[in-house]
Amino acid sequence: MPLTIALDGPVGAGKSSVAEETARRLGILHLDTGAMYRAMGLQTLRLGIDLTDEEAVSRMAESLRVDVRYTQGAQQTLVEGEDVSGLIRTPEVSMAASTVARYARVRQVMVDLQRRLASEQSMLVDGRDIGTRVLPQASLKVFLTASAEERARRRFLELQAKGLPDTYEQVLEELKKRDDQDMHRAVDPLRPAEDARMLDSTSLSFEEVVDTLVAWAREVSP
């Protein structure tokens, strides 16, 4: 029986990097569902589709081919066969992803794909509705969070390292806007699953967070 770990939490909580290292230590794959929604947001921007036009975005989602593949255990996200992994981490794409993720038909396309991938092998899946929607029967559910200020600080440092000009204040404002959009969308809003374990990383190091997740996973490992 595959080991499935559902890791949810708000933007900037460090889910992707924590999930990648945790999966590596457990010897399983990591599925970054946020990257899949970012790929969808990127394509919407590329095609010049109005992000507020739910019907147009939904039609695109139903015809667009989003795939993932793994190279030495690392996920690459593809749109129509093109690896867009390096293009989807900008603030513009982040907000576009949050917007298109509000739409029911977009989410259904993504959920179907994510469930199929997770059914085939042991996997750690991170996102915003994994424990509540995608994998409600996951072996382990964790909600990873941190204060808005700490999450903004981490995101600001990431953007600085990439040479992007955003200020800390801009990053914090965008993060709060993203939180509000994710938590109040009508379809699959961001919230902890009732049986999720809560993990606040505000004052924890990266290694401490990973150590905790690995220990919890080994408790429930089949």
Image (spheres, rainbow, N blue to C red):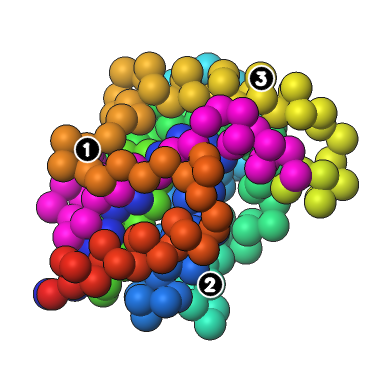
What residue do we see at 49% from left, 68% from top? 21
The residues colored magenta run 130-157
The kind of residue tagged 2 is Ala
Q: Which mark is residue 193?
A: 1
Give the residue drawn at x 64%, y 48%: 88
Where does residue 181 sit, x and y in percent of width and height? 47, 20
Q: Would residue 110 be found to the left or right of residue 51 on screen?
A: left
Q: Is residue 130 visible?
A: no
Residue assigned mark 3: 173
The stretch drawn in magenta includes residue 68: no
Q: Nearer the viewer, mark 2 or mark 1?
A: 1
Tell me which label, 1 or 3, sits earlier in the chain: 3
Marks 3 and 2, Cα distance to the nearest angstrom?
Answer: 31 Å
Instruction: Please give the residue where the numbered disc 2 appears in the rendered image.
Output: 74
Give whichever of 59, 89 is nearer the camera: 89
- Picture quarter containing residue 77? bottom right
- x%, y% of residue 13? 51, 42
Query: Between residues 119 and 130, which one lies in front from this camera angle?
Result: 130
**Which residue sits furthest front?**
203
Q: Which residue corresponds to the image point at 43% horizontal and 26% vertical from the top-left?
A: 182
Residue 220 x, y percent position in the rendering: 16, 66
Q: Could you give the CA–CA distance between mark 1 and mark 3, rounded to whole angstroms?
A: 26 Å
Q: Secondary structure at mark 2?
A: strand
- Whether residues under marks 2 and 1 lie with C-beta atoms below 8 angstroms apart, the answer is no
- Residue 107's spot in the image, x, y percent? 34, 37
